[in-house]
Image (cartoon, grey):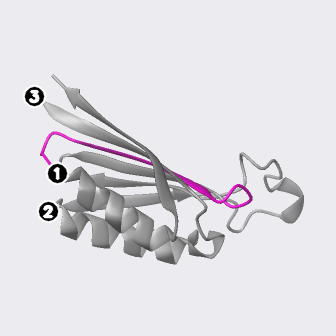
Amino acid sequence: MYGKELILDLQDCNPKTFTRKVIKNYMKTLCLAIDMERADLYFWDDYRVPVEERQTEDHLVGTSAIQFITTSNVTIHTLDVLKKVFINLFSCKDFDSTVVEEISEKCFRGVVVKSTEIERI
């Protein structure tokens, strides 16, 4: 096996946790717990965007972030109105998927409704 990818769908989350500060802390906590070395973290959202240019559709309102790790990346998309979080973690270094699920549920105060693990060969 070359690596694996974990794809998580969370629902019934608390949108108050969808801030850059919380997401940054989530990435730190997650990477520490699964022994991944963090590199750059980037955000994409409506922060500092004029009101008239902000996203308004339910499936677009939220924050996205990518945390590069030395073995690949963690990507997150939050949807404020729908109270959902989507997470993808890919690494050529093994990690405990259950730990990722538990940390994600605790941080975003939601429930993992779908967890998919893919082995990369």
Q: Is residue 89 left or right of residue 14?
A: left
Tag 1: amino acid: Phe
Mark 1 crowdedness (10 Å alpha carbons): few <14, some 14-19, many ≥20: many
For the N terminus, which image quadrant?
A: top left
The residue where tag 3 is placed is 1
Of tags 1 and 2, the one toward the viewer is 1
Q: What is the quadrant of residue 2 in the picture?
A: top left
The residue where tag 2 is placed is 35
Identify the mark nearer the N-term, 3 or 2. 3
Residue furthest to the right: 52
Identify the mark nearer the N-term, 3 or 1. 3
Name the residue: 82% across, 64% down: 50
Q: Which mark is residue 95?
A: 1
Is 92 rendered above or below residue 73? above
Tag 3: amino acid: Met
Per the image, label 2 sits on a secondary structure element best described as loop
Q: Is residue 41 left or right of residue 77?
A: left
Percent from the top left, x then y, of residue 97? 25, 51
Q: Are marks 1 and 2 in contact (CB under 8 Å)?
A: yes
Per the image, label 3 sits on a secondary structure element best described as loop
Percent from the top left, x then y, of residue 39? 27, 60
> For the residues marked 3 and 2, what is the alpha-carbon distance in whole angstroms?
19 Å
Percent from the top left, x then y, of residue 22? 48, 75
Tag 2: amino acid: Asp
Q: What is the quadrant of residue 47 in the picture?
A: bottom right
> For the residues marked 3 and 1, what is the alpha-carbon distance in whole angstroms?
13 Å
Mark 3 crowdedness (10 Å alpha carbons): few <14, some 14-19, many ≥20: few
